[in-house]
Structure formats: structure tokens, C-alpha cells
């Protein structure tokens, strides 16, 4: 069973590449960002609370996203594997994920880490903000806060996965197709 974490800062191309890798390797694609936006659009209690964090460029509480992940894993008992996009984002989330997978006889196969320069991240997100309608993509100061939250709370996961021998850096600058090719090669090498 293949279980991948697609990792990187906001705007690194996680959403774009996770969808492609999911289809290519027949994996269930789980994006916590997409799950949260679905809750926001449906105006559920969870969505209303999460929106307050997302609009400021902050993370949603760990317990909220971990519960969503449990629900999605339980909904796909016969899956060939999973690709986690935008999750885990804190060490607590990574530890919770390891535990949930272990309880189901699974483990993370590898953490693919997209490497992109900061100015490129800002440009991509501002560009998406022109058309996406996403409140967190419209304002440069919110985007910079998301990158700063990434550096403080999420980047420590690089050491977490390195210590388990699961960290795989992948060049994230270039065209979508070039990066997809590199990711496919990295997954095949697992
Ligand atoms: P996400 O939806 O995960 O948003 P993101 O970090 O911006 O990544 P995304 O996948 O959207 O961007 P991508 O790099 O694909 O999260 C949104 C918010 O939800 C978070 O800020 C947080 O508040 C909350 N949240 C989500 N998960 C959470 C968790 N686990 N814990 C707590 N809170 C959580 O793409 C960016 C743009 O670049 C796209 O427009 C794309 O078309 C473009 N692009 C991609 N590749 C490119 C390339 N090679 N060249 C040019 N453009 C490219």
C-alpha cells in the first residue's frame, strides 16, 4: 500500500500535483484545505469556526483536522493508498496520523517535499487570488503570515520525517509538467 504525504509551503503546488499523483498511482486524494472549504461553503458550525482561522492565514486547530482525516480514512476501507495534501501541518498532526495509520495496519511510505522560493510562492498565490475567490489569497500580508506560520509550525515536520528516513526533497520550481515528472520518478523509486 502506498501512502504519500505531499508537503511544502503555501503555494508550493501541493493541490495541483496531489490531484495528478492521486490519479496516476490510483490513490485517494485527501486535501484538508479542500475539506475545510467544503465545510465553509456549506456554512456548517465547523466551517464557520475554521473560516475565522483561515481568513487570518492561521492554522485550524489540530483536533478539527485530525477528526476530518479519520472520517475520510474510514470512508475508504478498500483504498489502494492515500495521498495527503496539506496534512499534516504540525508535529501533533503527524504523530496523530502515524497512530491512526498504525491502528489500521498502514504507514507513511514517503514525504515528498516541494522546494519553492518565497517570492515565487507569493506570486503564485496572488495570481490565484485574482480568480479563486479565496479570501486567504487576496492580501499579501495574509499570504506572508501563512508562509511565516508554515516556517514556525509546519517546517519542523521536515526533521520529523527525516528522522524516520521518509523525507524526499523534490524541486518545485519549473512548469507543472516538469515537477510532476520529478514527483513520479521519486515515487517510483520508493
Ligand atoms: P490549503 O488549501 O492546503 O492551501 P495552500 O497551503 O495554499 O496550498 P494549495 O494546495 O492551495 O496551493 P498549491 O500549492 O496547490 O490550506 C488553506 C488553509 O486551510 C490553510 O492556510 C489553513 O488555514 C487551513 N488548513 C488546511 N489544512 C490544514 C491543516 N492540516 N491544519 C490546520 N489548518 C489547515 O497552489 C498554489 C497556486 O500555484 C495554484 O493557483 C496553482 O495553480 C499554482 N501553481 C502550482 N504549481 C505551479 C507551477 N509549477 N508554476 C506556476 N504556478 C503553479
Image (spheres, grey):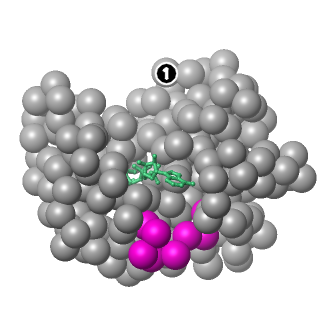
Residue 103 is one of the magenta-drawn residues: no
Name the spot of residue 127 as percent of width and height, x first: 33, 54
Residue at figure coordinates x 58%, y 42% from the top left:
18
Q: Nearer the viewer, residue 112 or 122?
A: 122
Can the viewer see residue 89?
no
Q: Which residue is mark 1?
A: 75
| Span of residues in magenta | 113-121
Picture quarter containing residue 41? top left
Q: Residue at x 38, y 65 (%)?
A: 123
Number of marks present in the image shown: 1
Left or right of 82 in this view: 67: left
Q: Position of residue 93 (x, y in %)?
A: 44, 58
Determine which quarter of the picture holds residue 157: bottom right
Can you say which quadrant of the picture contains the N terminus?
top right
Q: For the point 73% across and 30% down, which residue is it?
A: 24
Task: Indicate whether 29 appears above or below 136.
Answer: above
Amino acid at each position: 500500500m502506498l501512502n504519500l504525504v505531499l508537503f511544502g509551503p503555501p503555494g508550493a503546488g501541493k493541490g495541483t500535483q496531489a490531484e495528478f499523483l492521486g490519479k496516476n498511482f490510483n490513490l485517494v486524494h485527501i486535501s484538508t484545505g479542500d475539506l475545510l472549504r467544503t465545510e465553509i461553503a456549506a456554512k456548517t458550525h465547523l466551517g464557520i469556526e475554521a473560516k475565522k482561522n483561515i481568513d487570518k492565514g492561521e492554522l485550524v486547530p489540530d483536533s478539527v483536522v485530525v477528526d476530518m482525516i479519520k472520517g475520510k480514512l474510514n470512508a475508504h476501507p478498500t483504498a489502494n493508498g492515500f495521498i495527503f495534501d496539506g496534512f499534516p501541518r504540525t508535529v501533533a498532526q503527524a504523530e496523530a496520523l502515524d497512530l491512526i495509520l498504525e491502528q489500521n495496519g498502514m504507514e507513511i511510505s514517503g514525504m515528498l517535499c516541494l522546494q519553492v522560493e518565497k517570492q515565487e510562492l507569493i506570486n503564485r498565490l496572488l495570481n490565484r487570488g485574482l480568480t479563486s475567490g479565496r479570501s486567504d489569497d487576496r492580501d499579501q500580508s495574509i499570504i506572508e503570515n501563512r508562509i511565516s506560520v508554515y516556517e514556525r509550525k509546519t517546517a519542523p515536520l521536515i526533521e520529523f520525517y527525516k528522522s524516520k528516513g521518509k523525507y524526499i526533497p523534490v524541486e518545485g520550481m519549473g512548469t507543472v509538467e516538469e515537477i510532476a515528472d520529478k514527483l513520479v520518478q521519486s515515487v517510483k523509486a520508493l
